[in-house]
Image: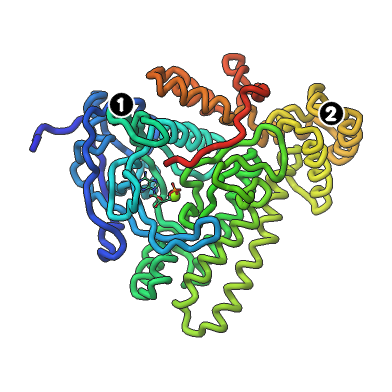
Amino acid sequence: MNKKALPLSISFDNSYSSLPEVFYARLSPTPVSKPGLITFNIELAKVLGIKYFGDNACLAEIFSGNKAIEGSEPLAQLYSGHQFGQYNSQLGDGRAILIGETIGRDGKRRDIQLKGSGRTPYSRGGDGRAWLGPVLREYVISEAMHALGIPTTRALAAVTSGEPVLRETLLPGAILTRVAQSHIRVGTFQVFSARKDFTALRDLLEYTIARHYPDSEGPLGFLKQVIEAHAKLIPQWMGVGFIHGVMNTDNCQIAGETIDYGPCAFMDSYHPMQVFSSIDQFGRYAYGNQPDIIVWNMAQLATALVPLMPDIERAISDFTQVVHNMVPLLRKNWLSVFSAKIGISSPQKKDEQLINALLNLMADSNSDFTNTFAALGKDKARDQFLEPEKFDLWEKRWMERIKDIKDVEETLAVSNPVLIPRNHRIEEMIQASVEGDFFLFHRLIEAYSKPYTSLELFKDLRRPPTEVEKVTATFCGT
Ligand code: AMP
Ligand code: MG
């Protein structure tokens, strides 16, 4: 044992590890041969109150899982879930290990998890590893989401493992350190409900209420609050053209953060049925289906909670009502996100028609989603349309509604990012990184940290892909 003090300390305050053993498997990350630090998120480390003294080699040892930080109680969490509508009775962290929880300077409790840290009892056929591409992809996109102001898990560090990972070919292995309000998923409730382990289910509910929704009461009150969180989140995704790609119930986090960035993507040209994920053959998780799917996922959470209620029939009726109420809630939140995107901060019901009229024109023209909204109120907006005269008519209607462009400029600017992580930029960055060049990775992180600011330095990142640059399919992060 190396007794030398590590150059980093985290003040752990673990709570999940106090739950009964049915909730997880205790185990340590599997060491890797030659870890190398790609990046360490100093800004996030500060929020978490992490103390470190900057030795890259040592940070790599820690964030690869080779060296344990004092106070860490590593474990892999159990969960199940519906994948593309089919129930899979046991999933769980197949390649992730929760190293512990810490309470940040902001008073918030967060999980710190290594992803790609070796096999666990839930790995099934998998190798427990991740390759560099998906690690950097999650790093850049989750940090971009955070900067866009959308609830998300975050990235604390990325390291190369020095070991190859076999996918279609041999690829460089890597490990991501993920930070989340927790890793409790809809699927965490489903696994105990399906097993009829109602003691565990009750323990989990009590634990989760205390951790995330302390002012909610009982299964019904809890369900309502989880629904409210997701009814906020999904319209926010839609407002930036984000497509999660695998909204399985195991990828649906109870605290309402975006989690599990697999084949996700941001749209370039707008189309409501846009899909990128290579595994989403039928478009279940298409851009415009996301509100329906989240309702479906919440119905699965409701179903999992029903057995905790004393009167099952009454519970089914109450829960159904609460789930159905999510539909108008999503619609209301969608309206406030999109009306802000056209500069309206107090939307009226009829603004929905105005927004949809614009979106329809955009779909007809394959207009760039981000650039069209960012150009509203400026001369170049009409350039985004195949038939600019049609946009002119829309703009006239819009002007009648907003009266004076000066009054809405501020709302437009804070509601329409100029920079989103475009797929072709992510792919270009991954390719360079695989060859050992991390310049683009660092550049994207910096650029996407200020997505609402138009800087000359990052002007090239605003350009949509050319025909050859277009990424038409994204692949799961396995
Ligand atoms: P995902 O599609 O990334 O949400 O993963 C679905 C399930 O497969 C989760 O239980 C993961 O932990 C597991 N999994 C994904 N990739 C691997 C891998 N390379 N090794 C072991 N388990 C994996
Ligand atoms: Mg997952």
Toward the viewer: 299 or 53?
A: 299
Kind of residue at badge 1: Leu
Task: Determine crowd level at label 2: few under 14, some 14-19, many 20+ residues with C-alpha closer than 10 A.
Answer: some
In this picture, residue 115 sits left or right of residue 445:
left
Q: Position of residue 374 (x, y in %)?
A: 71, 29
Identified at 63% across, 38% down, the residue is: 240
Which residue occupies 54% across, 79% down?
315
**Side (left or right) of 373 relative to 291:** right
Residue for badge 2: 386
Q: Quadrant of residue 214?
A: bottom left
Please determine whether, in this image, residue 453 is positioned above or below residue 89. Answer: above
Q: Is residue 25 visible?
A: yes
Looking at the image, what colour scheme do you see?
rainbow
- Residue 426 place in picture, x, y as percent: 52, 28
Q: Which residue in the protein does label 1 denote?
A: 37
Identified at 28% across, 25% down, the residue is: 36
Earlier sequence position, callout 2 versus callout 1: 1
Taking the view exactly as shown, the residue that stands out farthest to the front is 168
Crowd tier of the residue under label 1, counting other residues whose Cα lies within 10 Å: few below 14, some 14–19, many 20 or above? many
Please say whether residue 45 is visible from this viewpoint. Answer: no
In the image, what residue occupies the spot 20% across and 46% down? Answer: 71
